Amino acid sequence: MTKLKTFAFMISLAVAFAVSSAQSAAPKKAANKPATSAAATANPATSKPATALPTTEEVDAALKRTLGYDPAVTWEIYQIRPAAVPGLADVYFSINKQAAQHIYLSSDAQNAIIGELIPFGTNPFAPARAKLKDAFGPSRSGPNPPIDIVEFSDLECPHCKATQPVLEKLAADFPQVRFIFQQFPLPASLHPWAMKAAEYADCAGQMDKDAFWKYVDSIFENQGGIALATADDKLKELATGVGLDAQKISACAASPETAARIKKSTDLGAALEVNETPTVFVNGRRVRGLGSIPYENLKQLVQFEIDHAGK
């Protein structure tokens, strides 16, 4: 399904959901709601009222009513929660395994906003920067870096492969900036060998920070020649090619400590609502489609964030 068709579907979904909700006059009992869409409680510190949330069943019914005529269209509802804006419910879901989307519903479900809430204010990226202090992946920078550029990446992701040369060029043009690579392998249903590659690359970073970057580049360059059945052999071969001990890196990749580090990295991404790869943060600013931004504009953005370091 094209992005244009998906957008049209989402618009019609919002309308359908508002109509179906309006037709249901009976209030819903909180006990009937699943854990991910339980009614929000009021905040005693602010005395703000709770946001009435739709149930997963209600959202699923709206999707079926809108999209059910096409058996090729599937969806998955990930979470229903109060939005950052008081009075709105955030429905987080994907269509046909594409990047997850948001629909923001008013408490009475009569109006909906489709898209993304963006940070705003005189210091809009402070919350993301605070979370990104926990970034721990392999990094490179000069002394006293003014800002961090943090990338959440999947080594089987073709968009990540296309973006990597751009990040390499930025690293050359801005050697004072700290570049941090966080593993964020997507589910095996989408990228079957991404987790295995993340484990091998994580171990490369533990063994030799300089070799890590060469190893990542090598995996990206050889994406087309890696399959799940042969991933171990290929990843060991590529490790040897950049000067790493293939047997040590293989043993490390299979260890529970490595699995724990990958989970810690993906949990950090989840806390920042990372839902696609690559996702890049520049001084806490989420930059979407970094690889498609004209390079001179991208340099301006990085310099702008250096000039606004910590703001």
Image (spheres, grey):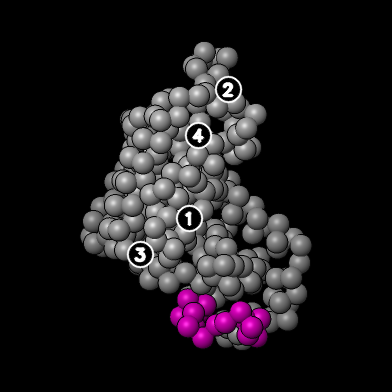
What number is the disc on residue 75? Answer: 1
Mark 4 touching mark 2, by CB under 8 A? no
Marks 4 and 3 sit apart, C-alpha to C-alpha, by 27 Å
Foreground mark, 3 or 2? 3
The stretch in magenta equals 218-233
The residue pinned by badge 4 equals 54
Kind of residue sitting beneath label 4: Pro
Q: Answer above or below: position of 122 versus 285.
A: above
The residue pinned by badge 2 equals 41
Marks 3 and 2 sit apart, C-alpha to C-alpha, by 38 Å
Could you tell which of marks 1 and 3 lies nearer the N-terminus?
Answer: 3
Mark yes or no: residue 164 visible: no
Q: Residues within 10 Å of mark 2 (few under 14, many from 20)?
A: few
Element type where label 1 sits in the image = strand
Could you tell which of marks 4 and 3 lies nearer the N-terminus?
Answer: 3
Q: Residues within 10 Å of mark 3 (few under 14, many from 20)?
A: few
Could you tell which of marks 4 and 2 lies nearer the N-terminus?
Answer: 2
Residue drawn at x 55%, y 82% is: 226
Q: Locate residue 69, reporting x and y percent.
A: 39, 58
Residue 236 colored in magenta in the image: no
Mark yes or no: residue 225 visible: yes
Could you tell which of marks 3 and 2 lies nearer the N-terminus?
Answer: 3
Residue drawn at x 59%, y 39% is: 36
Could you tell which of marks 1 and 4 lies nearer the N-terminus?
Answer: 4
Tally of marks: 4
